[in-house]
């Protein structure tokens, strides 16, 4: 399986560092040809408006849609989640619509608020450390969306088929669980919803 990290803007190097720690080879994706060569793609955090501009201008938007259509796996963090959503509000902007999510961008006022917090994660037996940086809020999830982790009663890690989306930054903590989940999900095409082993307390 070939893994790519969208590297037009944002904290793609932090994702690269996690994959390197896990011993997973990756390429930095900047062109439609790069996207055509991968089976899984990470869309990093950063500034979604700037990223969207690149996606549109460089033909990456279509390439990412094509990747999704051929069964590729996608993982968005923060701005990446904004790009993947069905609808983006406050302020509104176009998006790929590859996950049935409605997200609010300026969820924390003027986008200056950042916090590190922990919250229970559905498939883990311990709290997951979550770094929120000017994070969007997932306001609505579609029927086919599975909420994997919540924080303060709101979904912060969700999955729909072969798309995984987090409003926090798992690439900025030492816990590699979310990336490992994505890699397993990307590899295992046999199941629509792959779940790691669970303990009773993790449910
Ligand atoms: N709120 C930012 C945006 O609209 C995303 C912040 C982030 O990725 N850390 O793009």
Image: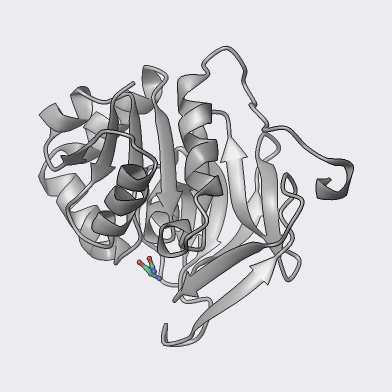
> Which quadrant, please, contains the C terminus?
top right
Residue at image point 41% right, 36% down: 74
Residue at image point 64% right, 26% down: 193
Please tell me in which quadrant of the rendered image residue 30 appears: top left
Q: Is residue 154 toward the left or the right of residue 46 in the image? A: right
Residue at image point 38% right, 27% down: 68
Residue 3 horizontal/vertical position (percent)? 30, 32
Q: Which of 3 and 60 is in front in this view?
A: 3
Judge whether 45 appears above or below 192 on screen.
below
Judge whether 112 appears above or below 102 on screen.
below
Residue 107 horizontal/vertical position (percent)? 53, 76
Residue at image point 43% right, 42% down: 75
The single residue placed furthest to the right in the displayed view is: 200
Q: Is residue 158 toward the left or the right of residue 96 in the image? A: right
Residue 98 horizontal/vertical position (percent)? 45, 37
The single residue placed furthest to the top in the displayed view is: 190
Q: Nearer the viewer, residue 84 or 24?
A: 24
> Which quadrant, please, contains the N terminus?
top left
Residue 176 horizontal/vertical position (percent)? 49, 50
Quarter of the displayed picture in which ligand 1 can be seen: bottom left
The chosen color scheme is: one colour
């Amino acid at each position: 399986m070939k893994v790519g990290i969208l590297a037009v803007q944002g904290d793609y190097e932090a994702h690269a560092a996690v994959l390197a720690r896990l011993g997973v080879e990756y390429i930095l994706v900047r062109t439609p040809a790069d996207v055509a060569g991968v089976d899984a793609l990470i869309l990093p955090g950063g500034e979604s408006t700037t990223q969207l501009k690149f996606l549109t201008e460089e033909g990456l938007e279509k390439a990412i849609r094509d990747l999704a259509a051929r069964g590729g796996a996608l993982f968005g963090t923060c701005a990446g989640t904004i790009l993947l959503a069905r609808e983006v509000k406050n302020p509104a902007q176009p998006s790929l619509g590859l996950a049935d999510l409605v997200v609010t961008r300026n969820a924390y006022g003027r986008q200056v608020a950042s916090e590190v917090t922990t919250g229970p994660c559905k498939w883990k037996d311990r709290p997951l450390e979550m770094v929120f940086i000017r994070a969007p809020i997932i306001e609505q999830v579609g029927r086919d969306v599975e909420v994997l982790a919540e924080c303060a009663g709101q979904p912060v890690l969700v999955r729909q088929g072969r798309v995984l989306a987090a409003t926090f930054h798992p690439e900025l903590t030492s816990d590699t669980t979310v990336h490992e989940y994505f890699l397993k999900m990307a590899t295992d095409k046999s199941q629509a919803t792959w779940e790691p082993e669970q303990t009773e307390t993790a449910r």
